[in-house]
Amino acid sequence: MIRVLFVCLGNICRSPMAEAVFRDLVDKENLTGKIEADSGGIGDWHSGEPPHKGTRKLLDKFQIGYKELKARQVNVSDWGNFDYIIAMDEQNRKDMQSVSNKAGSAKLAKLMDFVEDPREGNIPDPYYTDNFDYTYELISEGCNELLKYIRAENNI
């Protein structure tokens, strides 16, 4: 089982959106049982909360499930529990490095690292920009490319 963790600041906007979009892609590609996704936040401010209403609205619009998603804070054990840790922006990537105990072997990257010639290197936080549509566009593009990368790297 290949495990992917999406990370953002509070785990209510970007990372749960990426988790839901990625899970939907995995299901559509008949890879359920081979690839699994989760998400977490650097901070614990929203632990236990569902995704932000803006995220839920976009996922509903595209009929992507999210009902079971609840915010959680990332921790050191995530490094050993996941194969890929995918940050939404450079600060999230740096923050994940600081929670590393170097024991895990997860590959750390930003989601937009998988997109050739991306419009943005970081996915803007719609909690602050209120532009959930743009965030969704970037996340969808990034998740599609990430899945291609994982399939190629793992021969699935």
Image (cartoon, grey):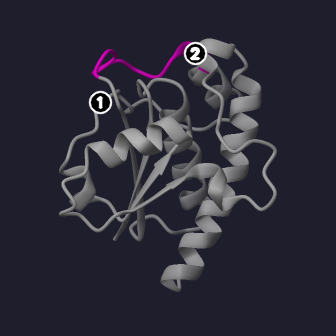
Percent position (x, y) of residue 42?
35, 31
Q: Residue at x 67, y 26 (%)?
A: 58
The relative height of residue 145 versus residue 67 in the rendered view (above or below) is below
User: Could you classify mark 1 by the number of other residues whose Cα lies within 10 Å: few (under 14), some (14-19), or many (20 or more)?
Assistant: many
User: Contact, CB < 8 Å: mark 2 with mark 1?
Assistant: no
Three-letter amino acid code at the position of disc 1: Arg
Q: Which mark is residue 51?
A: none
Instruction: Tally the numbered discs.
Output: 2
Percent position (x, y) of residue 16?
48, 34
**Mark with earlier residue (2, 1):** 1
User: Could you classify mark 2 by the number of other residues whose Cα lies within 10 Å: few (under 14), some (14-19), or many (20 or more)?
Assistant: some
Disc 1 target residue: 72
**Was residue 50 drawn as part of the magenta stretch in this picture?**
yes
Quarter of the image holding residue 70? top left
**Was residue 2 drawn as part of the magenta stretch in this picture?**
no
Element type where label 1 sits in the image? loop
Q: Which residues are magenta?
A: 44-54
In the displayed orientation, state which residue is furthest to the bottom: 155
Q: CA distance from mark 2 to mark 1?
A: 17 Å
Quarter of the image holding residue 7? top left
Q: Residue at x 26, y 56 (%)?
A: 79
Percent position (x, y) of residue 92?
46, 38
Q: Nearer the viewer, mark 2 or mark 1?
A: 2
Three-letter amino acid code at the position of disc 2: Tyr
